[in-house]
Amino acid sequence: MSDRDPQPVERQLPTEEARDLLALVRDIAQREIAPKAAEEEDAGRFPREVFTLLSDSGLLGLPYDSEYGGGDQPYEVYLQVLEELAAARLTVGLGVSVHTLASYALATYGTKQQQVEHLPAMLGGGLLGAYCLSEPSSGSDAASLRTKAVRDGEGSWVIDGTKAWITHGGIADFYTVMARTGEDGPRGITAFLVPGDAPGLSGALPEKKMGMKGSPTAQVHFDGVRVGDDRRIGEEGQGFFIALSALDSGRLGIAACAIGLAQAALEEAVAYATQRRQFGRPVADFQGLRFMIADMATQIEAGRALYLAAARLRDAGKPFSKQAAMAKLHCTDAAMKVTTDAVQILGGYGYTADFPAERYMREAKVLQIVEGTNQIQRMVIARHVAGPEAR
């Protein structure tokens, strides 16, 4: 692995507070996260203590209201925090993004009483969340989910079913769960906040994945899980709308993580190319590699500009669904291309676990799949541009 220090990204931040925040995040990333990343990913170890540190530092609730323990930060700033964390270790950056996604329903659609009761612990009390929408038979077709919640009297619900591909599945302290409470299709789905220690809730063994081995992804089983009606979020039948709204914001988180990962790969490639000598000079002097590096840097800058443009629309209260899909699509495709090129620049060394380039490439692939595959993103974008498909 290169001993070259990562170069700080030149950022345009809206306030001095935001600049101080990014400096804090960069310091934590370089001291507490990056040095252990390769070893812990290889061992498949989830760094729960890092998330405790981030919570204690006020970094797990950045885009939410400070009244409930959040950071009052705009998405423009929050996403750049994610980028820094993901550059140090994708398991951490993506984990923060998923936690933010899991907190979204309650923070946005919960009642005042629900928010007062639950949000402080979720945003700054050391808890870790998970988001439960996908199922074994309904991934991209999320509206066909089968997990059911049935009323048991006026005051409670009983949830039965299985969720799949859940980040933090089996270790989360709370789950935002979409379950069917009515008719087939999107109008029969309701959102619930389920505690991680609820009787009848269990996590399966984590999936054996190509990359991100330190981040547990598992099925979560609900076997007669009982929750009070006070843990229903929003109105009955509103859950699918809440889920899609959350995913618009979550896709921006994935985009930012993708750019952080790509930035780390670019740094590794440049460090190697400037130190490695062939034919009496650094390989970075050769035009073929210089052009590759130029293309990598351009894709990263374009992706960063795209996700920030979408974030600023969100911060201004304007529609951003199309731009979120574009950002997720472009940034994750760019991460796949940049990390693959980083392996190529390192040559044989890039294919070994002695350097992080091969891990970056394996990790990049999942970003094209999670929170809506890139094929789904293209469908979303096309609907905005060309209108809905003819039936």
Image: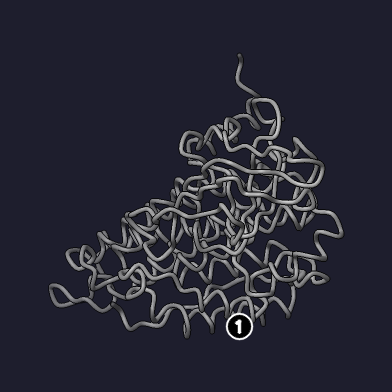
* Residue 189 x/y as whole percent: 68, 36
Residue at horizontal 61%, vertical 32%? 143
Residue at horizontal 82%, vertical 42%? 154
* Residue 80 x/y as whole percent: 60, 67
Specify the farthest residue to the right: 112
Q: Is residue 316 left or right of residue 337?
A: right
Specify the farthest residue to the top: 391
Establish if 189 lies above or below 350: above
Residue assigned mark 1: 24
Residue at horizontal 80%, vertical 61%? 115
Of 98 and 189, the residue lying toward us = 189
State the quadrant of the N terminus. bottom left
Of 384 and 196, the residue lying toward us = 196
Q: Residue flagged by tag 1: what amino acid is it?
A: Leu
Mark 1, secondary structure of its residue: helix
Q: Is residue 306 visible?
A: no
Other residues around mark 1 within 10 Å, as few (<14) / some (14–19) / many (≥20): some
Q: Is residue 364 left or right of residue 232?
A: left
Establish if 232 lies above or below 362: above
Location of residue 241 (image quadrant): top right
Establish if 153 lies above or below 287: above
Location of residue 304 (image quadrant): bottom right
Residue at horizontal 73%, vertical 79%? 17
* Residue 279 x/y as whole percent: 12, 73
* Residue 273 x/y as whole percent: 27, 72
Q: Is residue 272 visible?
A: yes
Q: Is residue 32 left or right of residue 236?
A: left
Q: Is residue 229 left or right of residue 196?
A: right
Specify the farthest residue to the front: 153
Location of residue 305 (image quadrant): bottom right
Of 310 and 142, the residue lying toward us = 142
